[in-house]
């Protein structure tokens, strides 16, 4: 994942830019960067794999001022990217995943375009978009051309002298929201960036919509529209609890998921708990519906440890998961535990670094309750799981079938015997007492938007 933030004001906006971008730190673990437009355009980018945003960029925060700026927390590529173009000097940040970036890059290279931000032999996605936009007659037509050509998903903030362009692709899988405060306007991937900075949500960008704003307000809107397909995983796991998308609160959805899990459950237990942090909201909902006390047999030591899902290597993911979660034996010993989890992706961390800690702390029973269906397909719209081999559900299918199979429809359907046997295999592999997932309809109901407005590709294999 990545998160982007932009702000334009009639006075200095550096504090807003610095803290607004920092409120996206849960979305990426590799790079963080800021660009601010004063008399000149200034930019700074840091690796955040082994450092925190605020400490690494505090010097930049204290050194520069300006009335417009953009920032990014990035999962892979350094950004913002600065380019000189027919539209002047531009700073651009993006979130998403363009799966045909190499094909698009080769086309531009054959036309004489050069790229300077190549890392590990791979084009920088944000630079690619900047070069595509720069070859068009206008910024709006350039952004629309990007939306016409990409495979995957992208949301864009592009800062020029006149203001900041904000745009979501025609499926709007990674939404953007506009916030306002007297004399200042901001745009964010995560609305949790707004309250403490005094912004009120003015609008959520629509699919394919392009807006231009400065400190005085919206100056221009354009776009050809499309069918909204917001990533449902934002509510289940990726998004911050204090955020909302299309007015639907992340924390409220997680509570509703937990309530749905409790309503379908039959086991006897002593307490409801969650794998921190994202499992906590689900567990609170479970406790609300079941009447069980909410307690914390596992707590997270936060300082210096990010999310174990987002780093690019399994070794780093496992190290973070091992070090950040600490069991509390006084609460765990002898207990029959309901443990709510947002999802099971690979399953290795849950088995080895979470469930095993509870057994080691003396748990009598460990019942895992998952707030979404089994993940069956790698995401092709954002940088998360990249292959079926990684997925716990696909390992179960391979074990049951004796080989990889192309058609897994019977395993996707929660009403089939094959699905039941897949869940039993995963339960045995995790070494937990029991395992229950929400099915797709239950999850969609908890989100509260029409299924047609949600991307559920990682569960169903169906995208556009």
Image (cartoon, rainbow, N blue to C red):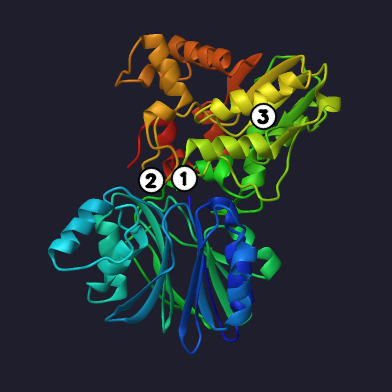
Camera sees residue 3: no
Say left or right for 111 vs 463. left
Do the numbered discs 1 and 2 sit on residues whose CB atoms are within 8 Å? yes
Secondary structure state at the residue bearing disc 2: loop
> Of tags 1 and 2, which is closer to the observer?
2
Q: Look at mark 3 in the image and give the residue it sits on.
A: 340
Residue extending furthest toward the right: 330
Q: Where residue 228 appears, x then y in whole percent?
A: 41, 50
Say left or right for 222 vs 4. left
Q: Where residue 319 appears, x then y in whole percent?
A: 59, 37
Residue extending furthest toward the left: 110
Q: Where residue 250 appears, x then y in whole percent?
A: 62, 47
Of callouts 1 and 2, which one flags the residue occurring earlier in the amino acid sequence?
Answer: 1
Q: Look at mark 2 in the image and give the residue it sits on.
A: 381
Camera sees residue 359: yes
In the rendered image of this protein, does residue 269 appear above or below residue 199? above
Do the numbered discs 2 and 3 sit on residues whose CB atoms are within 8 Å? no
Which mark is drawn over residue 231?
Answer: 1
């Amino acid at each position: 994942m990545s998160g982007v933030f932009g702000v334009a004001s009639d006075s200095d906006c550096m504090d807003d830019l610095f803290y607004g971008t920092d409120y996206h730190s849960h979305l990426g673990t590799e790079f963080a960067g800021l660009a601010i437009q004063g008399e000149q355009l200034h930019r700074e980018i840091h690796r955040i794999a082994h450092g925190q945003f605020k400490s690494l960029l505090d010097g930049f925060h204290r050194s520069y001022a300006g009335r417009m700026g953009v920032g990014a927390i990035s999962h892979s590529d350094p950004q913002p990217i600065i380019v000189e173009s027919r539209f002047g000097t531009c700073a651009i940040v993006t979130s998403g995943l363009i799966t045909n970036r190499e094909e698009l890059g080769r086309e531009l290279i054959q036309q004489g375009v050069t790229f300077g931000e190549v890392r590990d032999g791979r084009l920088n996605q944000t630079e690619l978009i900047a070069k595509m936009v720069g070859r068009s007659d206008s910024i709006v037509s350039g952004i629309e051309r990007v939306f016409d050509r990409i495979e995957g998903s992208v949301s864009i903030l592009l800062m020029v002298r006149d203001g900041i362009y904000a745009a979501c692709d025609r499926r709007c899988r990674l939404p953007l929201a506009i916030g306002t405060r007297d004399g200042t306007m901001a745009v964010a991937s995560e609305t949790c960036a707004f309250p403490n900075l005094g912004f009120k949500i003015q609008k959520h960008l629509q699919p394919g919509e392009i807006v231009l704003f400065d400190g005085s307000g919206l100056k221009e809107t354009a776009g050809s529209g499309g069918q909204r397909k917001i990533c449902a995983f934002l509510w289940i796991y990726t998004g911050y609890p204090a955020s909302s998308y299309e007015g639907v609160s992340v924390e409220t959805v997680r509570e509703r998921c937990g309530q749905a899990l409790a309503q379908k459950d039959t086991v006897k237990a002593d307490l409801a708990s969650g794998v921190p942090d994202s499992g906590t909201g689900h567990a609170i909902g479970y406790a609300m519906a079941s009447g069980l006390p909410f307690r914390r047999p596992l707590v997270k030591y936060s300082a210096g440890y990010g999310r174990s899902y987002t780093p690019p290597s399994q070794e780093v993911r496992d190290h973070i998961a091992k070090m950040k979660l600490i069991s509390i034996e006084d609460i765990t010993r002898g207990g029959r535990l309901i443990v709510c989890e947002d999802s099971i992706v690979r399953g290795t961390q849950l088995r080895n670094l979470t469930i095993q800690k509870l057994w080691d702390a003396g748990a009598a029973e460990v019942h895992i309750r998952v707030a979404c269906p089994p993940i069956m397909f790698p995401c092709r719209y954002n940088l998360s799981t990249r292959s079926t081999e990684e997925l716990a559900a696909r390992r179960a299918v391979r074990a049951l079938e004796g080989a990889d199979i192309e058609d897994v429809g019977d395993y996707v359907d929660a009403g089939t015997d094959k699905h039941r046997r897949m869940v039993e295999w995963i339960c045995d592999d995790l070494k937990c007492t029991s395992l229950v997932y929400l099915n797709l309809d239950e999850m969609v109901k908890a989100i509260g938007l029409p299924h047609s407005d949600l991307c559920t590709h990682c569960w169903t294999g169906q995208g556009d």
